[in-house]
Amino acid sequence: MPEGDTVYRTARRLNEALAGSVLTVCDIRVPQFATVDLTGQTVRNVVSRGKHLLTRVGETTIHTHLKMEGSWRVFAAGERWSRPGWQARIVLGTAEWTAVGFQLGLVEVLPTVEEDGAVGYLGPDILSPEWDAGEAMRRMLAAPEVPIGVALIDQRNIAGLGTVYRNEVLFLRGVMPERPVGAVDDLPAMIGLAHRLILANRDRADRVTTGNLRRGERTWVSHRERQPCRRCGTPIRKGSLGPDVLSERDTYFCPACQR
C-alpha cells in the first residue's frame, strides 16, 4: 500500500492539473455513484489526508483511497491513457487535462461538510503543516500494550506513516517491532525521526532513508530479507506481529542491532 508521501505527491499533481478549472467530464464507474454528474462545476482543490485523497468539486467531495493496486494518472486532454480503460474507476476531465483513477480501492462521493465522517477518525497527518506530534504520542500511549511496530502504522495514531517508514525508524532507533509502546524509552524521539524521514522524502520519487541514492542502497532493512545488515553484517530478518491486518504487514529488522 502506498505510503503517505506517495499520496501527498498524487494530491499535489491532481491539484496542479484540476484546481480552479471547470469539469467537462465526470464519469464515476462505481455503481453506487454512477449517476453523479459534476460537470460544469469548478474543482476547488485536491488534498491528501494521510493515505486518503479528497477532491473537492463545488460543495461536493470525491473521497478516494489507492489501497494496494490503485493509482491516479493525469493526461493531456485527448491523450491516450497508459492503462486499459476497464481499470478506470473515475474519470475527471477539464479543457486541458484528464485525471483517471485506476483500480482505486475506495471511491465515494459526499457533501464536503460531511468529510469528517469519512476521515475524522484519522490521527494527525504526518505531512500536514498542522502536524501534531504530541497528539500522535498521546494516541499511541493510550494503548501501551500494543507492539510499537503496530502502533506506528495505525492510521488512527499517525495518518500517512506506512510499513517502510515503520521498519526504517525502528531500525534506526534500535527497537524491535514487538516491543510494547509503553516500554519504548524515548517515544518522542522516535515520532520525531519518523516525521523527519517522511518529510525529507515528500518530494522524491525514489524513497531514501540511508542517504544513499544508488539503487539497492536506499533502505536500511526494508525488503532486504537475508541480506547483511549495513551496520553489523547480521542477516536481516522478515516477520509479522500477529493475525490482524496491521500486524500481518511485513516487518524487516536486524536481530543484532534492534532490541
Image (spheres, grey):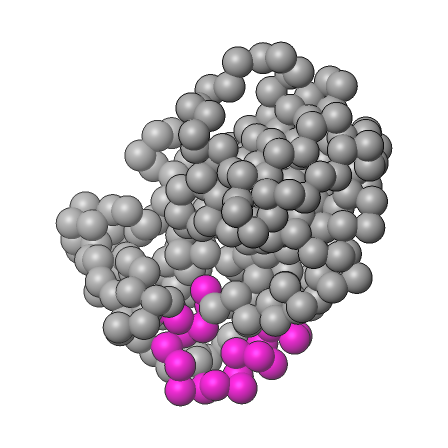
The quarter of the picture where residue 16 lies is top right
Instruction: Write the start and end of the magenta stretch as one range.
Output: 134-153
Where on the picture, by quarter, is residue 41? top right
In the rendered image, residue 8 lying in the magenta stretch gets the answer no
Going by the image, does 62 lie left or right of 148? Answer: right
Where does the C terminus fall, quadrant-wise?
A: bottom left
Q: Nearer the viewer, residue 214 or 233?
A: 214
- Residue at screen point 75% across, 39% down: 38
Q: Is residue 173 above or below residue 81?
A: below
Q: Is residue 22 above or below residue 199?
A: above
- Side of 183 where 193 appears, left or right: right
Name the magenta segment's main secondary structure: helix
Residue drawn 20% across the image and 50% down it? 225
Residue 239 drawn at (x, y percent)? 22, 62
Q: Residue at x 40, y 81 (%)?
A: 146
Residue 65 can be seen, yes or no: no
Residue in the image at 60% along x and 67% along y: 122
**Residue 131 visible within the image:** yes
Give the left or right position of residue 47, taking residue 58 as reference: left
* Image location of residue 21, percent across then percent down: 81, 29
Q: Is residue 135 magenta?
A: yes
Q: Nearer the viewer, residue 52 or 150?
A: 52
Q: Position of residue 188 (x, y in %)?
A: 57, 73
